[in-house]
Image (cartoon, helix red, strand yellow):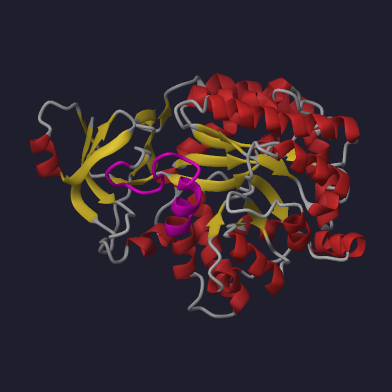
Amino acid sequence: MILTNGCIITNDADNNFYEDGAIYIKDNYIADIGEASEIEKKYPDEEVYDVEKKLIMPGMICGHSHIYSAYARGMATSKPTDNFYNVLENLWWALDRTLTSEDVKLNAYTTYMESIQNGVTTLFDHHSGPNSVTGSLSILAQAAKDLGMRTSLCYELSDRDGREIRDKEIKENIDFIKKCQKDDNEDMIKAMFGLHASFTLSDETLYKAREAMEGVYDGYHVHIAEGIEDQWDCQRKHSKRIVERLEDFGIITENTLAVHGVHINEREMDILKEHKTPLIFNPESNMNNAVGCPPILRIMEKGIKVGMGTDAYTNDMFDSLKVANILLAHNSTDPTKGFAEALEIQFKNNPEIFSKYFKRKIGVLEKDAYADIITLEYNPYTPFNKDNWGGHAIFGLTGRLVNDTIINGDFVMKDKVILKVDQEEIHAKSKERAQEIWKLV
């Protein structure tokens, strides 16, 4: 198939840009890319899809989310949410304890569909639901497979629901990792070992997690120092800081995703750098929870790779890109900061960080990269070219403009219509079920 008659942002290393470009998709990857006239001439027998002057660009990558939180939209809370601990206990943990396996399925469908609608083609999720642990990651994986979504999944291990559930959580992570190692759905579904945060993980539990992972994998997906309370807890109980503690357990590795990092210090940054562990920035969530702004500018200065996720605050990475820009400028009280860093995080670092979990590149449009592509109905009223498309990405593009989403060479949304499942039916079921869940929270 050839996508043609569109302006193409490649986001490749050379920043190639085609005002009237085309992409030749073979199977699930990009076989050729260039000027429309040349590509169409080279492959005259291929099916042609005319995007009618729309913008073509790589699908967006969300580096951290929580599918289990889907029912929270519009939900009221009756208990205090006046600090980070209370937000967790009275909102998120109250919600995740209500979820059944059917809820996990509905949450996955709705989150993946909205992500696809907003141009997200790869999503790394961190799941929780202590009363529906066993098999939950396979349920999420099946929803991703049904929709054609590229994803990485893990289960959030913690001690907060007792040892019996803790042991189920360890087993769920390990079983799913091994399952994906045997069959990753043609490189579409990956697995990591999920950990909640230091303050909900005893030494005993971390020992058990590490023991279970021996000879299996070394990739963890873990929250670090999101709230200052987490850091205080670690220093009080263990006489060390969070990243130091996790390093002692072998959890800080090149394949690990360290999420948030709001309250890490220079020593902790040095540890992340030494192990080449990326840090995943979630600007909107950090602001919403009032936990602070992580020292992203300093982290980047030290050479640590910073990626970006949403922490489920939104399913639109263009929104997160915008907020990253203004938060970094605001926090540094320097209007020259934020813009370049936000673009680097989303369009350079995210492809580099998350491509390593797959066999081909994602987040770029170049030969041999996966054909994860979006088109947007964007008609700029100022010049748009290879030198300034980043400014348009921050100030002009939004997920609402996405018209088509192609993942792994296959249309999963065309002309704003989800193709693989009945979206209306799923939304109706989710609305009905959410009303019942809200009564329990």
Q: Is residue 290 left or right of residue 55?
A: right
Name the residue located 30 percent from the left edge and 41 percent from the top edge.
368
Q: x, y (%) of residue 215? A: 66, 37
Magenta-drawn segment: 348-368
Q: Is residue 178 left or right of residue 72?
A: left
Q: Is residue 276 left or right of residue 91?
A: left
Name the residue located 77 percent from the left edge and 51 percent from the top edge.
197
Q: Is residue 356 above or below residue 388?
A: above
Residue 6 falls in which quadrant of the image? top left
Name the residue located 53 percent from the left edge and 62 percent from the top edge.
305
Q: x, y (%) of residue 58? A: 37, 46
Q: Quadrant of the N terminus?
A: top left
Q: Quadrant of the C terminus?
A: top right
Q: Is residue 244 above or below residue 193?
A: below
Could you tell me if residue 370 is visible in this image? yes
Could you tell me if residue 22 is visible in this image? no
Q: x, y (%) of residue 240? A: 83, 65
Residue 119 falls in which quadrant of the image? top left
